[in-house]
Image (cartoon, grey):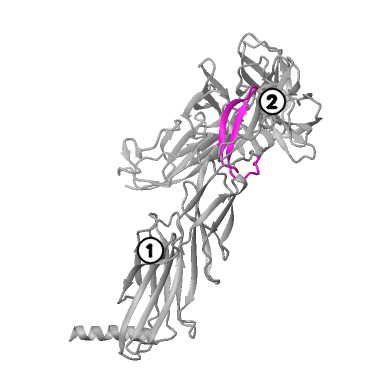
Amino acid sequence: MRKVTILIIVLVCCLGFCKAQQEQIRFTNVEVDSNGYVNLEWTYNRSFFLYTLNLHSYRSILERKNSATGLYDTIYSSFFFTNPWVFIDSNVNALTDSIKYRLTAICITVNNDRFIRTDSTTTILPTVHNMQNQSQYAYVSWNNQYPQGGIYTIYRKMPNTVWTTVGTTQQTHYQDTINNSICNDTIYYKVHYNANTYIDSSNPDRSLQLLSKSPPKGAWFTDPNPTTPCTLDVVTVDTATQDIVLSWDASPDPDIMGYFICQGSPCMALDTVWGQNNTTYTCTTRSSDSINSFRLYAFDSCFSASALTDPYNNVVLQMQSQHCTREIAFSWNEYINMPGGVGQYTLFLKYDNAPYRAVATEPSSSRSVSYTIPAGVRQVKAYLQTSNIGNTKRALSNIKTFEMMTVDTADFIYTLAVSVSEECDALQLRFLTDTHFAATGYNIYRRAEVGSFQMIRTIPPSANPIVDVVDNDVDLSAHRYTYYISVWDECELIEKSSNRVRQIYATINSNEGTNTISWNPYDGAGNLVNYNLLRKTENEPSWTPVATTQSCSVDDNTTQYGRVWYRVEAEYINPQSGHRCFALSQIVEYHGEPTVWVPNVFTPKRDNNNRFLPKTMFVKTEGYTMRIYNRFGLLVFETNDINQPWDGRYKGEIVPSGSYVYLIRYLGDDNYSNIIKGTITVLK
């Protein structure tokens, strides 16, 4: 039953195809493969009406035209069909011949109604010509002329590349422009045809697409054209690295592969720069302090070289100066083949850490200029800028450095210390000089507080490296002073200065028997060891160290009577000899006022507070007396020793509790006697 059903369906389909007057059979794909075989595909429209099952016969026939007889030979025939039909014709070589095919569908009913539908196609066989033997043009043509409305798409494959689309046309030929030189190699082309073909004229929406693909065809190409040279730009120097940098304008040829650089005469190979638009080159193998002549040529993808450019060169700046002068002579070589011609040379100078500035502009014919360097400049850097006419191109020379201190000078010079004299009316200065340098003299500079330095004295050189100088022209009560010493080189061009040193200035602040002495840090040459605080009093007239520290402040507790003097001693190491040296501050003074403080009660029989001893500050020991009386006026205790207390006893026995009168006599600053009296309570 199933086989009968399938047969009925097939017969119905065949009959419907024959009965539909507008139905057509069409080729949909014609492709030549790499073996020259032709892959064919065709189909019919399956949208039709079923009319009758009264079918006598149906047949589809594929034919190929015989080139010898001009007649079609049947190569495939079928009484049944699938949709689409696919057939590979392997008995042809479509790589060399264009093959024509015809497709016929015949339907005959039992009533002898005959319906015939046909379609034909031809394989595309392109040909490629190198037009006029020029590598930039290819002419592609092919045999087929398909119905109008379709598009031919042309594909190209360059050597060592993939297939790419290069154009479309409705003609049977195409001219291709090749932007890359081909150096004795083959370029391949293939052509695809694509169009919609209608199989039902009453219904344009019912359409099929025809695609036909040709085999690839190629032609031999070469590049007969000379390579266009590049155009020179400038030769300059990188200011950061001092490397020579070449630049040029690219060759206009579209297939330039790179540029070859040579140097000297004859021009020896230096390097190769790859890429048409890579038009700069940094030369690290040639010094910018030497004159180098460079030439270039461009080469294309066929490695065909252009003519060499004219030579062009870097500019080398030279500097010279005579002994003990500040005039420097600058000279340079000519810049050859500057684009547009050299317009001028400009000299730029840099003094020490200042920025570069233009100091001289010279015409194109100039090769030297002299310039006087200002006094005090230690180092000069210079470069030359070459500008073309119109100032549109600039090239820099090498940078030259010139040390102005090329003459003999002192290796070192120090200010060691500034000390205040014992009388505090002068400052004692100590300097360390280089005795190996034949100096003509040393200048001493001074300033008060933060004003400007003034030269106060010139002293002759000494065979002793330690130079001591006393400055009496000072007011130590009103000012604090800073000093330094300097020496000129043998040409008196450069003045070498020592470090700056301030006097050590001490201050004193007192609070309830504590004296705080503070001072500024020692800033002389050499490493600080310690600060020593020195003190003397009326009773101890010699200076005595009372504290050693590395800070700049010391507290001193003293209750001695009268005047107390302090000064600070900075102990440091001489940087040349390694010996210990000292710098002294001025003297600061404290005058304590005599004070006696008396307690009002004490307890002789207890462990704490069992003695009666007034506390004294800045009171003289001589002339001191203390007396104690009971309420009846009886003297129970007396002493002339300022440090002796009363233990509350009279004739070996503790006195009764109660109030007792004290009378204390001591000497003041004016040596007049002072008396204080009051009562003290004794508790047992």
What residue did someone put label 1 on?
A: 39
Residue type for callout 2: Val
| Residue projecting furthest to the left | 1
Residue 370, picture quadrant:
top right
**Front residue of this view, candidates 11 and 509:** 11
Identify whether 217 is placed above or below 418. below
**Front residue of this view, candidates 501 and 359:** 359
Q: Residues within 10 Å of mark 2 (few under 14, many from 20)?
A: many
Which numbered marker is on residue 316? 2
Image coordinates of residue 152 in percent, x first then y, are: 53, 64
Residue at the spot 42% in from the left edge and 82% down from the top edge = 23
Which badge, 1 or 2, is on the more N-terminal residue?
1
Residue at the spot 20% in from the left edge and 83% down from the top edge = 3
Image coordinates of residue 624 in percent, x first then y, are: 49, 32
Discs 1, 2 touching: Cβ within 8 Å: no
Residue type for callout 1: Asn
Image coordinates of residue 308 in percent, x first then y, are: 66, 31
- Boundaries of the magenta span: 249-276
State left or right for residue 589 relative to residue 4: right
**Front residue of this view, candidates 174 and 506:** 174
Q: How many marks?
A: 2
Residue 426 visible in image: no
Residue at the spot 48% in from the left edge and 31% down from the top edge = 550
State left or right for residue 99 relative to residue 375: left
Q: Does the magenta segment cover residue 254?
A: yes
**Front residue of this view, candidates 115 and 517:** 115
* CA distance for labels 1 and 2: 74 Å
Quarter placement of the N terminus: bottom left
State left or right for residue 632 relative to residue 437: left
Look at discs 1 and 2 and give the one toward the viewer. 1
Which numbered marker is on residue 13? none
> Element under label 1?
strand
